[in-house]
Image (tube, coloured by chain):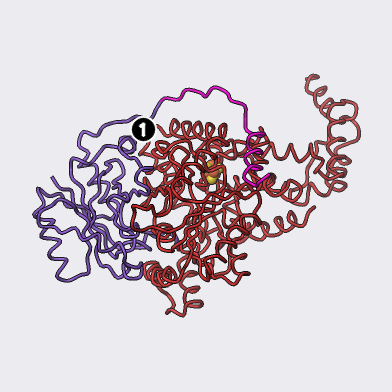
Amino acid sequence: MTETASSFIAKSTIKAADLEHRRKINFNIDKYNATVPLGKQQFSDVAIARERAKNAKWRAIEHLDQYLEHFEKQITARGAKVLWAETAEQALQEVGKICKEKNCTTVVKSKSMVTEEIHLNHFLEEQGIESVETDLGEYIQQLDGEPPYHIVTPAMHKNKEDVARLFADKLGVPGGLSPEELTQVARQKLREKYVQAEIGVTGANFIVADIGGIAITENEGNARLSCAWPKTHIVIVGIEKVIPSITDLALFWPLLSTFGTGQKVTVYNSIVTGPRQPNETDGPEEMYVILLDNGRTNLLANPAVREALYCIRCGACLNACPVYKNIGGHAYETTYSGPIGSVITPHLRGMHEYKHLSYASSLCGNCTEVCAVKINLHELLLENRHEAVVKGESTLAERIAWKAWKASSLNRKMMNMGNGKMKNWVVNKVFKGWTAHRSDLDFSQQTFNQMWAERNKE
Amino acid sequence: MSTRDKILQAVKNNKPALIPLQEIPALLDVTEENPIVKFTAILKNLSTEVKEVDGWDEVIQYVSELKQQYKIVTVIDGVDGIVNDGADTINQSAAALASLDYALIKGPIGIAENGAIWLNDKNLPNRLLPFICQHLVLVIEAKDIVSNMHQAYRKIQVNEEGYGVFISGPSKTADIEQSLVIGAHGPLSLRVYIVH
Ligand code: SF4
């Protein structure tokens, strides 16, 4: 077993038994579950909306190269600079270069999973640049020195008392503040940072191909401030985030907000098509868009799992997943957790190290059932298991065991060999791996043939 | 080969073969019988104060009241009795704008189905304005309220406008234990005037 796999098993074993943790997660997810059905009422037909969204993403991926080039051409014409990065390192280098050029000492950041993926904060810190998360949930996580716990609700595993304690510890404010007061503290602290920052970094929810723009959706207003307050705006976004047309936003924005948080609409839905124009009076002077591959073309190359690229990161599959609900977002030790994380991580970061995630599923299919763009998540998990075996990633003992199982299952004589006691011994004692996390198997004392013969006697 | 070409090549080599897409019925584009009623109801649900008024008198009155007490900016064109002083914000630093108490801005489109109001560079002398002020007041003419987003997108030309945003409600967050807090980083409150 790889170290990542054993660490995953150890952490999830602890978390699964942590009742306090489970209580907090369930509290949050229950609230989510209560609001989502209300949000869904805005669609005349949710099933058709999801189907259409899947179709639009399908089109986007079929023409991904043309769409990306078209986007680049359009937004470049309006003065933005498009940079391409094959790997996380390349993306970081580009950011580093820009920061140097601008003599940057402070960066304000809005929430973006891609920047987590490339570990931007860590990189900036090494360069002596302060990087401040401005989304409240991310800010809380940053104060606590933890990665986000959930792709939509970064501090889902903390209750309000935890957050109040954290603020008191780290910011020296009085203890026991209410969520309202805590939010105002963060607002004040972060406004100070906006004043200092030379560069704002954001992600993008969508790359809108036809107009050559990026679309950002949010409630707090921090992403807007991050991209319009500092003089330089850097967008970092995965190449798969393309949608063909601005009119598709009429579908994708409500889908994302409903499936993400149960809202009908988020407060701010912005479209940015470039930096300040010559005829415009404000906005950032410079805008960079870094298009990141970092393993996404591996997914594209694989017809069986390609549709995982349709994901709009709404987080619905996490909230629906019985595994996620028990082990939580940190046990995975990956940027993307839950079902979608288990599907894409082995392709982004290596099957060998991450194949174990495909087994962290009961294959109940609830993720597929709730997915905003109808990705067949549970089938893709199964596909990953299959690929791991085909690639020879399974252990020798497992291969031998299944071979023996197959041979004996296909052979009546072998099935009838030995008594139940002996079978129990072979499975439960010889192949101990099977029983490490399961109760013992108990074979019938009679063979099937014996039972059949007895039954037909009567 | 440059990184750009390498990525594009990888995409070209690996993208799926074209197959005809399934036909899926379009979503209903229902025109509301009374878009203003819907617009108002939705906005009220989004913690927004809505005032429906006949003519501009009440708005003019409101502006002059605010002016006596607060630092305000008004970006409303073509109304006698209201001075559009948006241009003053053009060269103001963000730090200066942050001390602004109120911004009043007229939007070109309102959307009934989700209570959103569209603003773009044409209505925004400064892109930060609607986010950085402490309180935001949006003004929309009743005739500019459409039923849904599909209809709105037909009216919008962002690539000509450069930047645009749909705003629905004051800024908010539910990042702490999912408890809703109005007033996150953006304005602490939103008031909307619908002018007939
Ligand atoms: S896989 Fe589907 S449900 Fe999960 S985050 Fe992506 S879009 Fe949402």
Q: Residue at x 21, y 59 (%)?
A: B74
Q: Element under label 1? A: loop
In the image, the segment drawn in magenta is B1-25
Chain of the residue on which disc 1 is drawn: A
Q: The disc labelled 1 sits on which kind of residue?
A: Ser
Q: Residue at x 80, y 36 (%)?
A: A444
**Residue B16 forms part of the magenta stretch:** yes
Query: x, y (%) of residue B171?
Result: 34, 58
The one of B9 and A121 positioned closer to us in this rendering: B9
The one of A315 and A456 positioned closer to us in this rendering: A315
The one of A331 and A117 positioned closer to us in this rendering: A117
The one of A210 and A191 positioned closer to us in this rendering: A210
Query: x, y (%) of residue A165?
Result: 49, 74
Q: Which chain is red?
A: A
Task: Answer left or right for B134 relative to A28.
Answer: left
Q: Residue at x 85, y 40 (%)?
A: A399
Q: Which chain is purple?
A: B
Query: x, y (%) of residue B11?
Result: 63, 37
**Compared with residue B77, is residue B183 higher up or lower down, i.e. above or below?**
below
Q: Please, which residue is most extreme toward the front here?
A: A278
Q: Quadrant of the C terminus of chain A?
A: top right
Task: Answer left or right for A384 relative to A261.
Answer: right
**Residue A381 forms part of the magenta stretch:** no
* Circle 1 residue: A44
**Compared with residue A117, is residue A255 higher up or lower down, i.e. above or below?**
above
